[in-house]
């Protein structure tokens, strides 16, 4: 079924009786060519690109709970490609280009909204670091503009320019950055994958791998054993737990990242803002809620909830940057489990077990990566060759000393 | 969270700085023939289980003790708090 | 007998019109008292809406209060305590509440079915940001922010108690009273400004007193107990780990009332009792959202507590016996198979129709669909409630509560007053607290027969604020969104500012109907903090504006300020950046002068911000060998050495000098930025890696004021203040020497012969309390040499002229080899980072090397952050040769100079390459040179 304005018009007059389920709810078959573990944004996108771009069939996505219930449904919805290291920037720029055509690809309005992102700077050193980064972005074909304080003021006159502990000196602006309706990304990929024959199996938890002689032959699940030629794992915060079932230890820690939304407000902020002197970034959803976040809580956690110090830290940053939001009220807060890698950059790679592939270590960059992560993981699964933009995201980079450390913090995940 | 410091009693977790997996106190021997592999394991591969987790916290806003905290990463319940130096001493 | 004081009249306005209410009113009760039934417009369809509830569950009655800077949007009229002069306004309507243009949306509602926007607005691509989205954004949202800084003040505090009682209804009052009598430290918190809960609303007879009298008597006794803290207007908004509860206390909503409007408390409680009561839920039926359709319990609250009748011809629609307690002319009871099928009336209900077809005239329909325990806080640690079929509601799971918490009263499903008392008694007895026998009260058991939804072709509202109807939920199910989380996200059910307080369970029931499953099979949604929305201003408290973060001032701060210094942020430090003199036209004039005066004679700069770590013990030297790449155990007493420290992953972490004052005593300096991190790291090494070593560390950064005294006349200047007993001549105190001495007639000091500027230079340290005095003394003593105070900028220029790496180069992404410091790495010993620094990627020969750059053509301006490419090469990542890290105008060389990392840099000296700075549109040909621009032989610093 194709979605369109006309179709809505037609359904409006016939009581909306004609809308079919967005995806089927099939029972698993006993055998697939490809099994993707994890029905989040990345898993669903992987299945979609396997079926569409790479023309593969016999694909299943196995989801422990309901699809889109993980980080794709609990993030701050920001998309951007404003990275420093070429190993990352090329990949995220590829992601941004896929976002730009996603709605037509999927025939689903995921509300990709390129209203721009500005990372503010407050010192000369920050400005120069942003210049280096902006130049990296441009070398990689992305867009970047270095604004001075007046440039920021013309876009965001209500920021605290006059009475700030750390005055705003300017910002690095990526006009093509923006936000996407996060849940819709999961649903859009699910629908498009389902239409291409992918079995999306919810409430199906993987409880073990069927590994013989160094080869992965399938998985055990709460819905029985399923055989597969290739198994891809894409489970974000559960990466260590799932890969442990295959006997692997990962260069990953699971942390909690909190996110927040305010009550609905008439338009306040046009784009996305990131404070350079505190932990705070914000955008406004189309419904009117300010969607914001800050630093991770900083300790290993699988609890999907955080604690007060970070909440206060984020609010302090927010009110310091935008003093008017003192009167906005925090409506809801939640926590996502994020797979913090040892250098802050992801892994899309084969494992030493034949037929078992891994996509993870996304830290808090997972959402904006979704289309490219899906595409690159699909390519790896389909062809056994990494995508050009993801060829550095290897397991062995730590052993070889080829870390991709954007922030220069070393092997301490809570600082990335 | 609150951490029950073995010397100072319960303290708000915001007084502490977190490092991670308590295995970081077991630094490999640089003279070992397999030092490169051991240091890679030591530095990069982390125990990251749901459930009980031994981890290092530094009492930065306090007495500057490094502590080994046994905490459940599913519930955040803290079972045990020890001085890291006591564990390190017992090891050697 | 109501609880408002009719002798105290309060004037207020709503949408500009004047009204009067009484002391004790809420804004909602005062509006109803004045027969104002239309108070708002719904989110999506802009339907007319009136007050529905009487507490924090209110979905409809959202208003803006105050105007101008202090304007506060989205306030629930039901929780605003009325005060004289209150100005309130309706929101989300244009041009007026009564005639709202966007109410046209209601006519087009068939097109706006759940999730319609995911299926359209995709063509053409550019229209989303330009056309569709702006229109949606303008229409969406509720209240408006003032767009001015919030001028209000908020405070924070900590409280500790044995027992926190949450909710002051019958259960909470009885628990708090008995625990208080037993001597426990008790905090009793309630979100309402009047404690008493449902007793205020229903006014039952208790112990032969009216409910209102009984509450007054209990509150009087509680107030008299010194160990009990009563906190009305205080919402416990969240439960956090290890017995920490978040609380928000509202002091006042008035402008210019108390200094502090709200206080955010962190309550540390050994035990807590949740007695938060219950919330009545509506029933879904056609057009159940008209003004005048209210919760039955709210109608009773307005009658009994406020003395306001909500209608002259009230009808009740109920599925339980609590609804029957409402004073009404018509009873429609689902248990007798009577159902409301529709309502009429544009801006207020005028009549209703029964399923039987009968039409009843009414001006107020009181609805009771049963009660939901307010169990939200039991879910904040991911506890899941359990379904109770007899009570037709979710109850807290006693096996899955936050640590230390018990739940009593209606929050636990004990919906009768006597049940509330008994729960309190049981919990206290379990805690071995003596509890008096509960007072006598008429006992009525709650009887409910689950009923949720009168099916209709018309729209029946489930979530009133977000305009989610039963049909939307059914459509979501039809489209495969059958998990309750999917339904919420697809329809926005329960996502409005009331967080589904009145809608979640009804929505779940409608979904269960659609799926043909039971409610518990269909699922539940758990609640997250906060219980009610919390102002960001309160969460930030006083840490905003200039007080966002602390300010660290250097010992010479006052002096520098007197000299007209411009300060710059360096972490939390404020450091003098340059010190302008009269006639100087720009900062460059000042910086050039400071450099020239220093290099020509002598300059002084405050370097106290450098981290200083005192390292003592028999194994101090051995310890330093482990943490620095180079050897310190061989350093002679009275000497300093440059040291480089790696992280365990082999990357450069920090550098600095380390001075040896005795066999067992070293003084280490770190960079300003890394002072904390290095100290933490050293403590880790000491306590966790080598606990057997006899070594002790203490940070003395703030204990010593330290000044660099640099320039050819620096020794002459210092000789004027160093006490004569000490010899600082070149022979006896050469480059890299250190000694403890006295200055100015006996003041203890440390002198280091170190140079960051490349000049003959020293660093002199005194206890911080002498810092101000020392800078003044130095500047006075230096007058004959025309001594200059120089700032961070001149310091930077001089270090770039010398090619010394600093923060920009020690960025955590560089190795000793990159920095040109691999010669320092001792081959003889292990140290932190050594093994991993030998990995292929770090040791790569084509690695980046720190080199210098000058413009290839005169007049060129080097800019920082530029990337290098071969001349004429295409600007693609593969051709990227490195990047510029530090630049300066060198007054000594009369040119811009820069240092940066260049691939294979050491073999490129003399080459011309391009520095591409796209974001500044400055592309420049530069010549690769040695980074040691000035006095490369170092003759000056040894002089």
Image (cartoon, helix red, strand yellow):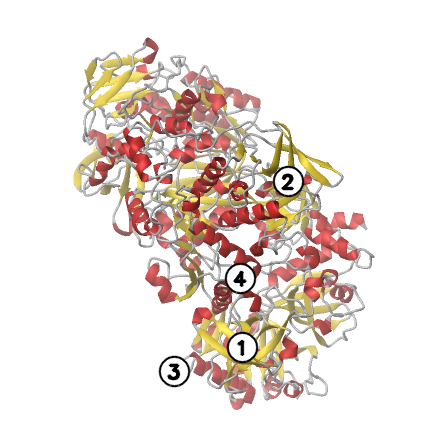
Vertical side of C60 occupied by C734: above or below: below
The C terminus of chain A sits in image quarter: bottom right
Of circles 4 and 2, the one toward us is: 2
Which percent across, then down, holds residue C523?
A: 48, 26
Label 3 sits on a secondary structure element that is loop
Visible residue check, residue A162: no
Which percent across, then down, holds residue A270?
A: 35, 53
Share a chain, discs 3 and 2?
Answer: no
Vertical side of C683 occupied by C873: above or below: below
Label 1 sits on a secondary structure element that is loop
Check contact, mark 1 vs mark 2: CB within 8 A: no
Q: What's the chain of the residue with tag 4?
A: A
Residue indicated by mark 2 = A230
Which percent across, then down, holds residue C668?
A: 67, 68
Residue indicated by mark 1 = C871
**Pointer 4 local density, CA inside 10 Å: few below 14, some 14–19, many at least 20:** many
> Residue at the spot x=41%, y=22% of the render?
C514
Residue indicated by mark 4 = A84
Of circles 4 and 1, the one toward us is: 1
């Amino acid at each position: 079924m194709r979605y369109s304005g006309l179709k809505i018009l037609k359904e409006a007059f016939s009581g909306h009786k004609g809308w079919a389920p967005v995806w089927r709810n099939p029972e698993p078959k006993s055998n697939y060519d490809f099994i993707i573990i994890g029905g989040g944004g990345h898993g669903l996108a992987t299945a979609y690109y396997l079926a569409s771009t790479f023309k593969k069939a016999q694909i299943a996505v196995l989801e422990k709970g309901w699809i889109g219930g993980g980080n794709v449904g609990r993030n701050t919805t920001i998309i951007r490609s404003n990275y420093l290291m070429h190993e990352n920037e090329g990949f995220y720029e590829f992601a941004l280009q896929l976002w730009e055509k996603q709605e037509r690809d999927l025939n689903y309005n995921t509300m990709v909204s390129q209203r721009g992102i500005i990372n503010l700077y407050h010192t000369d050193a920050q400005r120069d670091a942003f210049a280096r980064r902006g130049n990296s972005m441009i070398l990689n074909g992305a867009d970047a503009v270095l604004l001075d304080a007046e440039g920021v003021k013309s876009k965001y006159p209500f920021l605290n320019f006059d009475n700030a502990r750390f005055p705003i000196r300017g910002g690095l602006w990526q006009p093509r950055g923006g936000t996407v309706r996060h849940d819709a990304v999961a649903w859009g990929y699910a629908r498009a994958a389902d239409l291409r024959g992918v079995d999306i199996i919810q409430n199906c938890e993987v409880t073990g791998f069927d590994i013989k002689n160094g080869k992965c032959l399938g998985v055990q699940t709460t819905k029985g054993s399923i055989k597969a030629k290739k198994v891809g794992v894409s489970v974000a915060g559960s990466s260590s737990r799932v890969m442990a079932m295959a006997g692997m230890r990962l260069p990953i820690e699971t942390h909690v990242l909190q996110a927040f939304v305010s009550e609905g407000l008439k338009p306040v902020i046009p784009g996305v803002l990131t404070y350079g002197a505190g932990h705070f970034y914000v955008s406004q959803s189309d419904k009117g809620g300010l969607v914001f976040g800050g630093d991770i809580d900083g300790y290993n956690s699988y609890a999907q909830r955080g604690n007060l110090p970070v909440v206060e830290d984020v609010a302090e940053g927010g009110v310091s940057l935008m003093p008017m939001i003192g009167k906005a009220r925090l409506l809801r807060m939640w926590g996502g489990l994020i797979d913090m890698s040892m250098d802050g950059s992801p892994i899309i790679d084969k494992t030493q077990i034949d037929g078992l592939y891994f996509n993870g270590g996304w830290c808090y960059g997972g959402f904006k990566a979704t289309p490219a992560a899906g595409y690159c993981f699909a390519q790896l699964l389909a062809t056994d060759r990494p995508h050009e933009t993801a060829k550095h995201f290897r397991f062995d980079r730590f052993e070889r000393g080829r870390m991709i450390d954007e922030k220069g913090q070393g092997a301490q995940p809570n600082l990335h | 969270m609150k951490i029950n410091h073995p010397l100072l009693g319960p303290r708000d977790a915001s007084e502490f700085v977190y490092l991670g997996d308590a295995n970081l106190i077991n630094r490999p021997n640089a003279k070992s023939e397999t030092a490169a592999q051991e240091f890679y394991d030591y530095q990069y591969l982390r125990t990251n289980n749901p459930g009980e987790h031994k981890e290092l916290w530094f009492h930065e806003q306090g007495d500057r003790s490094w502590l080994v905290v046994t905490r459940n990463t599913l519930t955040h319940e803290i079972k045990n708090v020890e001085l890291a130096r006591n564990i390190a001493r017992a090891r050697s | 007998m109501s609880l408002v004081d009719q002798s105290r009249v309060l004037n207020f306005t709503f949408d500009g019109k004047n009204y009067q209410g009484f002391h004790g009113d809420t804004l909602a009760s005062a509006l109803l008292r004045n027969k104002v039934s239309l108070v708002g417009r719904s989110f999506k369809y802009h339907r007319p809406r009136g007050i529905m509830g009487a507490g924090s569950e209110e979905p409809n009655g959202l208003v803006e209060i105050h105007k101008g800077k202090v304007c506060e949007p989205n306030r629930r009229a039901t929780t605003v305590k009325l005060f004289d002069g209150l100005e309130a306004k309706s929101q989300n309507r244009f041009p007026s509440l009564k005639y709202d243009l966007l109410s046209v949306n209601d006519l087009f509602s068939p097109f706006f079915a759940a999730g319609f926007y995911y299926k359209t607005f995709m063509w053409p691509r550019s229209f989303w940001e330009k056309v569709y989205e702006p229109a949606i954004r303008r229409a969406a949202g509720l209240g408006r922010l003032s767009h001015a800084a919030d001028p209000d003040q908020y405070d924070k505090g900590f409280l500790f108690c044995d027992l926190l009682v949450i909710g002051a209804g019958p259960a909470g009052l009885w628990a708090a009273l008995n625990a208080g009598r037993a001597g426990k430290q008790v905090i009793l918190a309630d979100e309402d400004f009047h404690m008493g809960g449902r007793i205020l609303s229903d006014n039952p007879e208790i112990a032969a007193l009216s409910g209102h009298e009984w509450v007054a008597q209990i509150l009087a006794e509680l107030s008299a107990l010194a160990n009990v803290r009563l906190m009305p207007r205080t919402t416990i908004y969240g439960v956090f780990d290890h017995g920490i509860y978040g609380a928000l206390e509202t002091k006042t909503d008035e402008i210019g009332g108390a200094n502090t409007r709200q206080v955010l408390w962190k309550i540390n409680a050994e035990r807590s009792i949740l007695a938060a009561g219950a919330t009545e839920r509506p029933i879904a039926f056609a057009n159940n959202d008209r003004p005048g359709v209210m919760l039955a319990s709210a109608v009773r609250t307005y009658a009994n507590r406020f003395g306001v009748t909500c209608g002259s011809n009230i009808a009740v629609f109920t599925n339980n016996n609590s609804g029957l307690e409402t004073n009404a002319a018509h009873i429609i009871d689902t248990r007798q198979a009577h159902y409301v099928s529709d309502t009429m009336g544009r801006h207020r209900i005028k009549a209703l129709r029964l399923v039987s077809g009968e039409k009843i005239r009414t001006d107020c329909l009181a609805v009771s669909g049963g009660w939901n325990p307010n169990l939200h806080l039991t879910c904040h640690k991911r506890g899941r409630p359990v379904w109770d079929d007899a009570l037709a509601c979710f109850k807290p799971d006693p096996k899955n509560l936050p640590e230390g918490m018990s739940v009593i009263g209606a929050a636990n499903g004990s919906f009768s007053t006597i049940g509330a008392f008994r729960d309190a008694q049981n919990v206290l007895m379990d805690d071995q607290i003596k509890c008096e026998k509960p007072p006598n009260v008429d006992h009525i058991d709650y009887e409910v027969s689950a009923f949720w939804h009168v099916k209709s072709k018309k729209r029946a509202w489930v979530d009133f604020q977000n305009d989610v109807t039963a049909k939307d939920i059914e459509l979501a199910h039809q489209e495969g969104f059958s998990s309750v989380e999917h339904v919420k996200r697809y329809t926005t059910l329960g996502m409005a500012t009331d967080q589904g307080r009145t809608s979640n369970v009804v929505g779940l029931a409608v979904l269960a109907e659609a799926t043909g499953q039971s409610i518990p099979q269909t699922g539940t949604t758990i609640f997250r903090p906060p219980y009610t929305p919390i102002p960001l201003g309160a969460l930030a408290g006083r840490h905003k504006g200039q007080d966002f973060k602390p300010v660290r001032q250097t010992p010479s701060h006052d002096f520098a300020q007197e000299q007209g210094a411009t300060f710059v942020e360096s972490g939390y430090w404020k450091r003098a950046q340059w010190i302008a003199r009269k006639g100087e036209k720009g900062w460059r004039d000042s910086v050039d002068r400071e450099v020239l005066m220093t290099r020509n004679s002598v300059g002084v700069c405050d370097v106290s911000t450098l981290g200083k770590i005192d390292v003592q013990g028999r194994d101090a030297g051995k310890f330093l060998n482990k943490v620095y790449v180079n050897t310190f155990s061989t350093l002679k007493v009275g000497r300093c050495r440059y040291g480089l420290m790696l992280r365990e992953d082999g990357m450069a972490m920090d550098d600095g000098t380390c001075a040896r004052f005795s066999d067992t005593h070293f003084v280490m300096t770190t960079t300003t930025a890394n002072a904390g991190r290095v100290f933490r790291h050293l403590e880790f090494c000491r306590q966790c890696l080598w606990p057997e070593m006899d070594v002790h560390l203490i940070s003395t950064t703030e204990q010593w004021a330290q000044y660099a005294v640099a320039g050819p006349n620096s020794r002459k200047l210092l000789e004027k203040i160093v006490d004569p007993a000490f010899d600082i001549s070149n022979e006896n105190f050469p480059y890299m020497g250190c000694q403890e001495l006295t200055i100015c007639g006996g003041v203890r000091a440390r002198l280091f012969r170190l140079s960051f500027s490349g000049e003959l230079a020293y660093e002199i340290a005194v206890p911080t309390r002498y810092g101000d005095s020392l800078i003044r003394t130095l500047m006075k003593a230096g007058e004959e040499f025309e001594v200059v105070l120089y700032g961070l900028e001149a310091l930077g220029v001089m270090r770039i002229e010398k090619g010394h790496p600093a923060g920009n180069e020690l960025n955590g992404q560089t190795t000793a080899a990159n920095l040109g410091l691999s010669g320092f790495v001792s081959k003889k010993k292990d140290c932190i980072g050594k093994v991993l620094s030998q990995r292929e990627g770090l040791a790569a020969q084509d690695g980046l090397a720190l080199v210098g750059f000058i413009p290839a053509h005169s007049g060129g301006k080097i800019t920082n952050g530029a990337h290098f490419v071969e001349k004429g090469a295409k600007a693609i990542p593969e051709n990227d040769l490195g990047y510029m890290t530090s630049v300066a105008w060198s007054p000594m060389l009369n040119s811009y100079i820069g240092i940066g990392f260049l691939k294979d840099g050491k073999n490129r000296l003399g080459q011309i390459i391009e520095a591409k700075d796209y974001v500044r549109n400055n592309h420049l040909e530069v010549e690769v040179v040695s980074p040691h621009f000035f006095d490369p032989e170092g003759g000056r610093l040894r002089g």
